[in-house]
Image (cartoon, grey):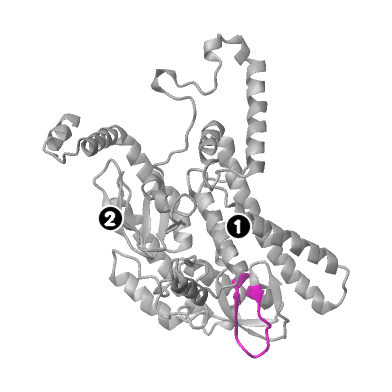
């Protein structure tokens, strides 16, 4: 990046950082609700958003005693917006939890592989939730029936016989996407399908064919809708 | 705690998304500037117009603190023209609004609901992504700000019918590979069509899964061996049938 790029960036991007974070969070939320697999945890974004929500709650608590009607109405607006933000964050986290509950062993393997990169798949609390939930589950299974099986049949992640016991999300599931930049040729593996995706286009396409351009998992040139 | 909903947004969630669209209001009361979580709101001074998110505009409207200026595409003249276009071109949806200039490489590109497609200076000749939700919400909460609310409502209903028919007739082109272009489709239409469209594509994919797997293996093999002969392709097809 040289100085011209930096200047161009400043000139174009006059949007306040708060607004950009809202746009990013909204995009992450929609993507997480739509994508068949769990997407990397946007840790910087979430840190900023949660910190702002915390400060806003403090502000509301500070001013609630104020009976001046003008401030009161301002407070109504602030609280309405606060609730909207809280809904976004909550729905985002719950969508992730649903995926964690559905495929814990698969996600743990993916997460372990991702810890060396810059974008770990799960947040620390999600990891904690998943490991303790999973250990409770496996303890329960083994105390209620698994312990009575032969030792060779007690595993929960058996891969013998060419079939893995570990459930995986369907990565070829069709998704609705919108290109935010010219992406170029998309090739759907295993078929003759090939097409060009241009900025602004909306396509129904397999997740596996676009994931390397997607928000979260790839370059971010394609968003899920 | 985990979300009990299936993948894809539900209609209330799509409406929630649509409430982030910017609309133009004419305030009837002063309102000081606000520092909100999603960025600052500039002070509202009657009678100067201001662009604010739809959720705030609806809040102000319900308390009679502002009037909403419907976007230019949401009037009888524009909607009639768009409806004519939709009926004339039975294959595709009417084109979406023109995109803003390409942002530089280092910035986050914006997309609906954050494009100013529903403010007073939006394009009058194209339906934006959240057209149906926005239209319905404005007609419900601010019908007195429209010139002919009933006529607008009728046109919206007509547009919805025509476009749903297109979405349904588009089923014929669906196949296992996916890759269907749907430019101009609306948010609520995606929500309504999602379960069916993706269900058909996924179902067809599962039927042809074994053939596809063969094809994949062969493609990979060819890639490794570095030869691009597809001479035996037809034979394989025959064997399959």
The quarter of the displayed image where residue A139 is located: top right
Residue lying at the far front in this picture: please name it: A2
**Among the two numbered marks 2 and 1 on one chain, the one whose residue lies closer to the N terminus:** 1
Q: Which residue is mark 2?
A: A195
Residue for point 20% across, 35% down = B225
Looking at this rendering, what residue extends furthest in the bottom direction? B47
Classify mark 2: helix, strand or loop.
strand
User: Which residue: 70% across, 81% down?
Assistant: B65
In the displayed structure image, the side of residue B164 where residue A125 appears, left or right: right
Q: Is residue B159 left or right of residue B213?
A: right
Q: Residue A20 lies in magenta, yes or no?
A: no
Q: Is residue A87 left or right of residue A23?
A: right
The answer, for residue B4, to whether it is visible in the render is no
The disc at residue A45 is: 1
Q: Which type of secondary structure does the marked residue at label 1 adopt? A: helix
Question: To which quarter of the image does residue A50 belong?
Answer: bottom right
**Range covered by the magenta-colored residues:** B40-58
Decide: is B116 above or below A201: below
């Amino acid at each position: 990046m040289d100085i011209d790029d930096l200047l161009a960036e400043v000139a174009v991007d006059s949007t306040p950082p708060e607004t950009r974070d809202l746009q990013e969070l909204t995009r992450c939320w929609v993507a997480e609700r739509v994508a068949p697999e769990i997407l990397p945890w946007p840790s910087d974004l979430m840190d900023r958003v949660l910190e702002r929500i915390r400060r806003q709650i403090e502000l509301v608590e500070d001013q609630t005693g104020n009976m001046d009607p003008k401030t009161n109405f301002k407070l109504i607006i602030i609280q309405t917006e606060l609730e909207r933000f809280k809904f976004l964050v909550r729905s985002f986290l719950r969508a992730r939890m649903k995926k964690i509950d559905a495929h814990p062993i698969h996600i743990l393997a993916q997460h372990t592989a991702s810890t060396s990169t810059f974008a770990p798949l799960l947040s620390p609390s999600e990891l904690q939730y998943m490991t303790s939930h999973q250990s409770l589950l496996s303890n329960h299974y083994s105390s209620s029936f698994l312990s009575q099986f032969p030792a060779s049949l007690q595993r929960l992640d058996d891969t013998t016989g060419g079939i893995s016991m570990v459930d995986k999300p369907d990565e070829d599931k069709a998704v609705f996407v919108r290109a935010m930049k010219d992406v170029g040729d998309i090739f759907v593996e295993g078929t003759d399908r090939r097409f060009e995706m241009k900025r602004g286009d909306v396509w129904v396409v397999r997740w596996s064919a676009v994931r390397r351009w997607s928000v979260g998992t790839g370059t971010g040139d394609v968003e899920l809708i | 705690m985990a979300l009990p909903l299936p993948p894809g947004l539900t209609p209330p969630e799509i409406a929630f998304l649509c409430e982030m669209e910017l609309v133009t209001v004419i305030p009837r009361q002063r309102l000081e500037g606000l520092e909100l979580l999603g960025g600052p709101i500039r002070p509202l001074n009657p009678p100067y117009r201001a662009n604010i998110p739809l959720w705030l505009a609806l809040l102000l409207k319900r308390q009679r603190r502002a009037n909403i200026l419907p976007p230019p595409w949401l009037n009888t003249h524009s909607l009639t023209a768009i409806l004519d276009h939709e009926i004339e071109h039975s294959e595709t949806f009417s084109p979406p609004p023109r995109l803003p200039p390409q942002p530089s490489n280092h910035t986050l590109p914006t997309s609906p609901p954050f494009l100013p497609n529903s403010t007073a200076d939006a394009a009058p000749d194209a339906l934006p992504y959240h057209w149906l939700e926005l239209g319905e919400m404005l007609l419900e909460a601010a019908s007195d700000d429209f010139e002919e609310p009933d006529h607008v409502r009728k046109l919206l209903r007509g547009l919805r019918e025509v476009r749903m028919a297109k979405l349904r007739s588009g089923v014929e082109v669906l196949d296992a590979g996916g890759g269907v272009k749907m430019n101009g489709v609306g948010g609520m239409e995606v929500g309504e069509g999602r379960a069916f469209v993706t269900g058909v594509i996924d179902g067809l994919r599962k039927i042809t899964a074994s053939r596809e797997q063969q094809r994949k293996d062969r493609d990979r093999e060819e890639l490794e061996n570095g030869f691009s002969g597809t001479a035996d392709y037809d034979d394989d097809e025959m064997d399959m049938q």
